[in-house]
Image (tube, helix red, strand yellow):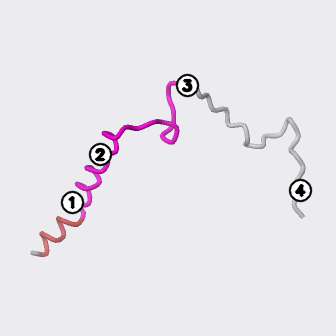
Amino acid sequence: MADDTEPAADQDSAADVGHDLEAERTTAPMSDYSGRAVGIGALVALIGIAIVFGIPLVAMGL
């Protein structure tokens, strides 16, 4: 049976990770992004797909 008791105060439960919501540097899931950033990302993805599939198709003569 699992132990459902709370950890002692001096034990590290990994629940407190110390996020500073007022910090200048944030991680991506916390950051807002604009429609322009989404558009640039989509364009980069399309160019990458064209390169990945286009070069082999051209090399095969299609």
Element under disc 2: helix
Q: Is residue 25 above or below residue 54?
A: above
- The circle on residue 62 is none
Q: At x 45% / y 36%, what residue is drawn? A: 32
Q: Residues within 10 Å of mark 2 (few under 14, many from 20)?
A: few
Please identify, in this view, whether the residue under mark 2 or under mark 4 is nearer the observer: 2
Disc 1 to disc 2, C-alpha distance: 18 Å
Q: Amino acid at mark 3?
A: Ala
Q: Amino acid at mark 1?
A: Ile
**Residue 37, image x and y in percent?**
33, 40
Disc 4 to disc 3, C-alpha distance: 37 Å
Q: Earlier in the sequence, mark 2 or mark 4?
A: 4
Q: Amino acid at mark 2?
A: Gly
Q: Amino acid at mark 4?
A: Asp
Q: Earlier in the sequence, mark 1 or mark 2?
A: 2
**Residue 48, image x and y in percent?**
26, 56
Q: Earlier in the sequence, mark 3 or mark 1?
A: 3
Q: At x 87% / y 60%, what residue is drawn? A: 2
Identify the residue under disc 4.
3
Disc 2 to disc 3, C-alpha distance: 27 Å
Q: Are marks 4 and 3 in contact (CB under 8 Å)?
A: no
Element under disc 1: helix
Disc 4 to disc 1, C-alpha distance: 54 Å
Please identify, in this view, whether the residue under mark 1 or under mark 2 is nearer the observer: 2
The secondary structure making up most of the magenta span is helix
Identify the residue under disc 3.
23
Query: Which image quadrant: the C terminus?
Result: bottom left
Q: Are marks 1 and 2 in contact (CB under 8 Å)?
A: no
**Residue 56, image x and y in percent?**
19, 69
Q: At x 17% / y 65%, what residue is drawn? A: 55
Identify the residue under disc 1.
51
- The circle on residue 39 is 2
